[in-house]
Amino acid sequence: MVARCEATSVAHRSEEPMATKLQRIAEKARKQPSFRFTNLYYLMNEELLRGCFQRLRKDAAAGIDNVTKEMYAENLDTNLVELLERLHKMAYIPQPVRRVYIPKPGSDKLRPLGITCLEDKLVQSGLVQILEAVYEQDFIEDSYGFRPGRSCHQALRALNVTVEKGLVSHIVEADIKGFFTNMDQNWIMKFLGHRIGDKLVLRMVKRFLKAGIMENGELMASDEGTPQGGSISPLLSGIYLHYALDVWFEKVFRRSCTGFARLIRFADDFVVCFQRGEEAERFREELVERLGKFNLEVEPTKTKVIKFGRFAAKSTAATGEKPETFDFLGFTHYCSTKRDGTGFRVKRVTASKKFTAKLAAFKEWLMKSRTMKTAELWEVTRAKLRGHYAYYGVTDNTCGITRFAHEVKNLLFKWLNRRGKRGCINWQKFNKMLELFPLPEPRIKVSMYQAR
């Protein structure tokens, strides 16, 4: 018989802050890795939901009910009381996700976008906080995707240190086909059942999985994958790969290796570092079988084993060749040397596909902003450049961000000319504008060798 969670007693401590209650859950989960929590749904209270509401973006798009944050706030207290009443009577039924399509920058394809209703956003956000308290204690250290206090840059830094300091000579670069839409919902519920014994929490999660999709007024079933656009989707995907990939790698595959092996993952984007080439090849083969058990498959053309690292650099140098490169989290990684020409270094530059897509997105925004006042256009451009540098401005990528800044200036010059008479702004006038109202200079913002 499964023991009930000790947190049951916390339910009666209404004066205790929600943060403290969640911390108690987290501590229990950390100390007892096999414990199943049978009483968590009581945490779905007004304090939790009010906090979720406050964190919602003001400009978030409305779902199929057309309710915005501003509208909901007009009677917030009453709305939250009524929402909680439905939740605890299990009378709350999530509404279908509104699906729209937006252009995919740098491509003729359209990207599906899911927009959930406001109350669904609140409930999902509440469930995420509760489930995170448990699963943050279980996730492996090298899982970085959509987790509190973790980022892409941390994953990149871990990869950098591993390759430069470790015994790495091979990298497995893998790509999972349509991961978010192909996850098996039965497996999602089974995976949740390892730690969650609260039937109310499980029923509510399942309702979100089955809520459906509304597209052009037509309701479609959602029998696979996670809720599009929902805040619970990243967490459920993390739990899915935790059991389908991470646990298997750490407890089964890595233990069968005679050489060094390390998996570094951000959401469904991951690379695996190996010391021995034969073990890298074996992983690539067994990965196909492992993921196949959970309704997932790899893209063969994007899943490969390459020689990479200081040992690979030495062996290829002897034959006059260059080590292969690989892409991870928007960067192309390549083997190089230190600034003085001695010693091995991993370096990275903005991946060509990402560079093209980011530039296409900026051009598309310019086309839609023709009527925007020049001062406002300039300020938004500044913000976009700062955002680009904040992510892509990593150690050794000066070339990538400088080139992006150059292309953005060319596009600005072109589109400012189109707003008036042809040739109304020449390069002399444009450069004068840049002097008076300078754009942010491309700078390295993130060190691969020092956490900031």
Image (spheres, helix red, strand yellow):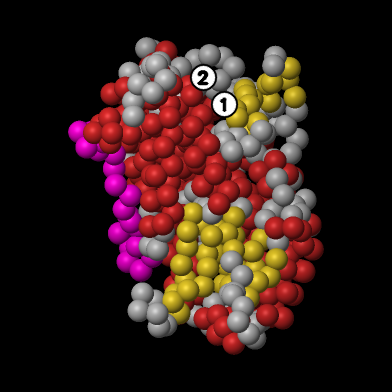
Mark 2 vs 1, N-terminal side:
2
Give the secondary structure at mark 1. Answer: strand
- Using the image as rendered, state which of residue 145 and residue 15 is in the foreground: 145
Q: Residue at x 65, y 68 (%)?
A: 172
In reply to whether residue 108 is colored magenta, the answer given is no
Question: Tag 1: residue type?
Answer: Ile
Note whether residue 30 is visible. no
Q: Is residue 125 above or below residue 292?
A: above
Name which residue lies at 44% across and 54% down: 400
x and y percentages locating residue 328 in the rendered image: 55, 58
Residue 438 lies in magenta, yes or no?
yes
| Element type at mark 2 | loop
Q: Position of residue 159 (x, y in %)?
A: 49, 67
Up-down: is 364 above or below 354? Answer: above
The numbered mark at residue 9 is none
**x then y, percent, for residue 314:** 55, 85
Figure check: 64 above or below 14: above
Where is the C terminus found, in terms of image quarters?
bottom left
The amino acid type found where label 2 is placed reads Ala
Which sits in the foreground, 307 or 206?
Answer: 307
The boundaries of the magenta stretch are 434-452
Identify the residue shown where x is 59% and y is 17%.
64
Q: Are marks 2 and 1 in contact (CB under 8 Å)?
A: yes
Q: Position of residue 134 (x, y in %)?
A: 50, 52
Q: Locate the N terminus and report the quarter of the image it occupies.
A: bottom right
The residue tagged 2 is 62
* Residue that mark 1 sits on: 115
Q: Main secondary structure of the magenta part?
A: loop
Q: Nearer the viewer, residue 219 or 79?
A: 219
